Amino acid sequence: MTERIDEAPMCFACGKENPIGLQIDFRFDGEFCTAEFTGNDNHVGWADTIHGGIIYSALDDVTANVIYLQGRKAHTAKCEIRYRKPLHVGETILLKGWVEKERGRLIVLKGEARRKTDDVVVADCDASFMIFL
């Protein structure tokens, strides 16, 4: 695993010092960024369903970390998410992000969140990031 280029201890998605953050541990194997996340009662939107914004945050960060864990800096330009199935409290999702194409400063990525128990896609996204100059 490549070291992070900037420490972000308070990042909502991955910051280890953020007491209300998701504290997701992202890994990069040279092609894919992966992680696991299990929502709890603090992440509920309705009844025992994890809020869509929490799922969005996890997908935005799994795509971002494809770039960051390669030692490059970028900002999200656009991230379009499609929710396919509900995610309930206590269910673990497997997050995966990868590059689709790169042109100049623009990187287009895909991300997905699958339930660990049955491999069903909960949500997926198409994201674009702009590399810092």
Image: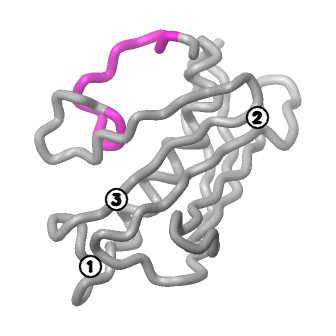
Check residue 13 for magenta coloring.
Answer: yes
Find disc 3 in the rendering and name its residue: 38
**Quadrant in the picture for the C terminus:** top right
Q: Is residue 120 left or right of residue 46?
A: right
Residue to which mark 1 is pinned: 45
Q: Helix or strand or loop: what does disc 2 sit on?
A: strand
Magenta range is 3-14
Indicate which label's residue lies in the foreground, 2 or 1: 1
**Vertical position of residue 54 compared to residue 48: above or below:** above
In the rendered structure, which disc, 3 or 2, sits on the residue that comes first in sequence? 3
Residue at 56%, 77% (x, y): give it. Answer: 83
Assess disc 2: are there few (<14), some (14-19) or many (≥20) residues with their C-alpha within 10 Å of its C-alpha. Answer: some
**Label whose residue precedes the other's in the sequence (2 or 1):** 1
**What amino acid is at disc 3?**
Thr
Is residue 34 part of the magenta span, yes or no?
Answer: no
Foreground residue among 133 and 8? 8
- Please name the residue shown 52% across and 64% down the image: 116
- Where is residue 49? Give x, y as percent: 32, 81
Q: Quadrant of residue 46?
A: bottom left
- In the displayed orientation, state which residue is furthest to the bottom: 47
Residue 23 horizontal/vertical position (percent): 29, 40
As displayed, is residue 4 above or below residue 74? above
Give the Cα separation between the discs numbered 3 and 2.
Answer: 28 Å
